[in-house]
Amino acid sequence: MLKLEIVTPEAKIYSEDVDMVTLPGVEGEMGIYPMHVPLLTQVAAGEVVALKGGQDFHLAIGEGFVQVTGDRVAIMTDMAIKAEDIDEAKAEEARNRAEARLKEKISDEELATVNAALLNSLAQLKVKRGRRPM
């Protein structure tokens, strides 16, 4: 068993014992099983899939970090939402707002913020729509 914990600055979003975790690394998707070698790396905005008792649980996460030890996966991220809690209409609206802002002349700092918002909304839409094209 692995203890999967996902935390944001606001709250602990998920804390369960799971059989396996798939997460979006910056170099690509990673699968984590119990007794994985220790690892500390970045995660990209995308989908986390936790396998527990033969059932998949899906969450959307933003950018952040993951620490893996033999029996624990801890994800620290700016955004995490369980699939059933995602409001598809609000995520689509956030995506449209971010895409519109990217077409305007904005500062580098604001560009980073808008890009993060866009990635977070895309991650939510991917999870909610079950990997259907956007």
Image: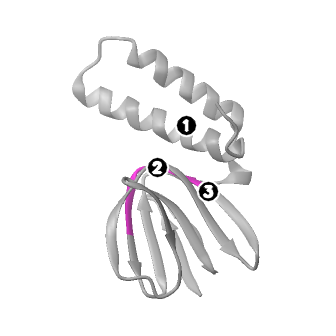
Counting residues from the N terminus, which is met first, the one under dot 1 or under dot 3?
Answer: 3
Q: Give the residue number, with chain letter if any, for mark 1.
A: 122
- The crowding category of the residue bearing disc 3, from other C-alpha atoms within 10 Å (few below 14, some 14 to 19, many at least 20), is many
Taking depth in this image into account, of 48 and 87 the one nearest to the observer is 48
Gap in Å between the C-alphas at discs 2 and 3?
Answer: 10 Å
- Residue type (three-letter) at the residue carrying disc 3: Leu
Residue 63 sits inside the magenta stretch: yes
Measuring 35% from the left and 34% from the top, which residue is drawn there? 113
Q: Give the residue number, with chain letter if any, for mark 2.
A: 62
Q: Is residue 7 visible?
A: yes
Please say which color scheme the image uses.
one colour
Secondary structure, magenta segment, majority class: strand
Magenta extent: 59-66
Q: Position of residue 8 (x, y in %)?
A: 46, 59
Counting residues from the N terminus, which is met first, the one under dot 2 or under dot 1?
Answer: 2
Residue 59, which numbered label?
Answer: 3
Label 2 with label 1: CB-CB less than 8 Å? no
